[in-house]
Image (cartoon, grey):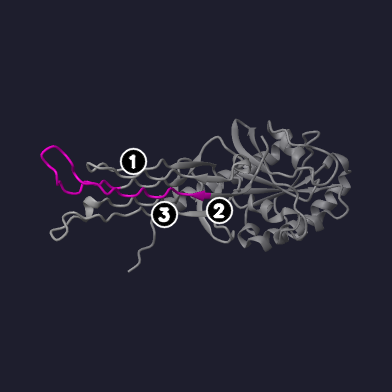
Amino acid sequence: MKFLDQAKIFIQSGNGGPGSVSFRREAHVPRGGPDGGDGGRGGSVLAECVDGLNTLIDYRYQQHFKAQSGRPGAGRNKNGPSGEDITLKLPVGTQILNEDNDMVIADLTKVGQQIVLARGGDGGRGNASFKSSVNQAPRRHETGFPGQEMWVWLRLKLIADAGLLGMPNAGKSTFLSAVSAAKPKIADYPFTTLHPGLGVVRNDQREFVLADIPGLVEGAHQGIGLGHRFLGHVERCRVLLHLVDATAEQPVENWRIIRNELAAYDAGLAGRQEITAISKADACDHSRLAEIKAALEHAGASHVVMLSSVTGSGVSDVLRLLQQEIDQDHAAEITAKSEPEPWQP
C-alpha cells in the first residue's frame, strides 16, 4: 500500500428537507386542520479515528464527500426521514485543517475518537407547526436549512515511540530493516526514502514502534526537500535516534544541520530526548570513529554510540537505550496525568 500523509478533500453535509403543506381530508371531515409534517434533518459529515490504517491513500482518488439530504415531510403529520450521515475513517495521528492550512480543526490521536466536521441542515417545518388561534389554516412552511460545505486538509503525523533522523543516505532505512520486519527501499544514493515508514521493533521481549523519517536537508524547516511534511512526523515521537554517517566528509556538521532544523521548526523538538548513533561503523577504522565520537560530544551530542546495521554491531545496545528512554517518557506522562491541577481562586 502506498503511503500518503496529506490530502485535500471537499465535504458537504446534507440539506434539511422541506416541510409539507397539507390539510386533513377524511370522510365527514371536509375541512380538517393543517397536518403537514416537518422535513428530515440533513446528514452530517463525521470523522472517526480507527485502528489498522497508517496512510491517507483512500483520499487521493475520492476527494468529494457529500451526505444525504433530508426527505420532505408529508401529510398526516408525517415527518420526512433524516439523511444518512457519512463517516470518514482516518488513521491515528491525523490532523484536520481548514482550506488555508493554517488552523487545526481536529486532532485525532485516539482510536474511537469522533467529531462532527459538517453538521446537516435542520428540516423545515410543515404548515401544522404554524397553526395558531388567529390562523387555523396556514399555508406557510419552511423549505429546510442548507448544510455546510468546505474544503479541508487531512495531514497525517505518524505516532511512533521512536523516530529515525539523519541526513539523506545516513543508513536509516538499513537500520529499520535490520531491527524490524519492515522492508523499506535501500540504495546507495540520497533520498532513497521518499515516504515515512513504520516498523515494530522487538528486543529483549519488548516491543516499540520505530518511524523512519526521510532524510532532512538544510532549510527543511522552510519546506526545502518536503521538510515541513517530514518534520511533522517527528513531533509525535517520544525519543529520537539521530544517525550520523561515519563515512561522510563532515559528520559533525551534518549532525549540527539536523539539530538546527529541529530547533527552527519547533523549539520543543530541540529539547526532545535524543540518542546519537554513528552509523556505518564497519566502514571506518577505530581511530576515525573515536575522533567523530569525541567531536560530536564536544559539539553537544548526547548518548553517542556506534553501530553497524550490516554486521549488527552495537544495534542491541541502541535498542535498549531507546526502550529505556521510551519507558521513562511514558512513566513521566502517566505521572503528569495523575497529578491534580493547581487550585485557582
Q: Is residue 278 left or right of residue 23?
A: right
Q: Amino acid at mark 1?
A: Pro
Residue in the image at 58% along x and 61% along y: 102
Q: Is residue 299 left or right of residue 42?
A: right
**Secondary structure beneath label 3:** loop
Pointer 3 local density, CA inside 10 Å: few below 14, some 14–19, many at least 20: many
Task: Looking at the picture, tell me which residue is in the foreground, 100 or 49.
Answer: 100
Query: In which quadrant of the rendered image does the N terminus lie?
Result: top right
Query: In which quadrant of the rendered image does the C terminus lie?
Result: bottom left
Mark nearest the camera among 2 and 1 is 1
Please name the predominant secondary structure of the magenta segment in the image: loop
Q: Amino acid at mark 3?
A: Pro
**Secondary structure beneath label 1:** loop
Pointer 2 local density, CA inside 10 Å: few below 14, some 14–19, many at least 20: many
Q: Mark 1 sits on what residue?
A: 81
The reply to whether residue 314 is in sight is: no
Mark nearer the N terminus (2 vs 1) = 1
Q: Residue furthest left?
A: 28
Mark nearer the N terminus (1 vs 3) = 1
Q: Amino acid at mark 2?
A: Val
Q: What x and y, as percent, mark residue 216?
A: 75, 53
The reply to whether residue 82 is in sight is: yes
- Disc marking residue 152: 2
Vertical placement of residue 242 versus 316, above or below: below
Q: Mark 3 sits on what residue?
A: 146
Mark nearer the N terminus (3 vs 2) = 3
Q: Is residue 15 magenta?
A: yes
Residue in the image at 59% along x and 33% along y: 206
* CA gap, disc 1 and disc 3: 16 Å
Mark nearest the camera among 3 and 2 is 3
Q: Which residues are magenta?
A: 11-38
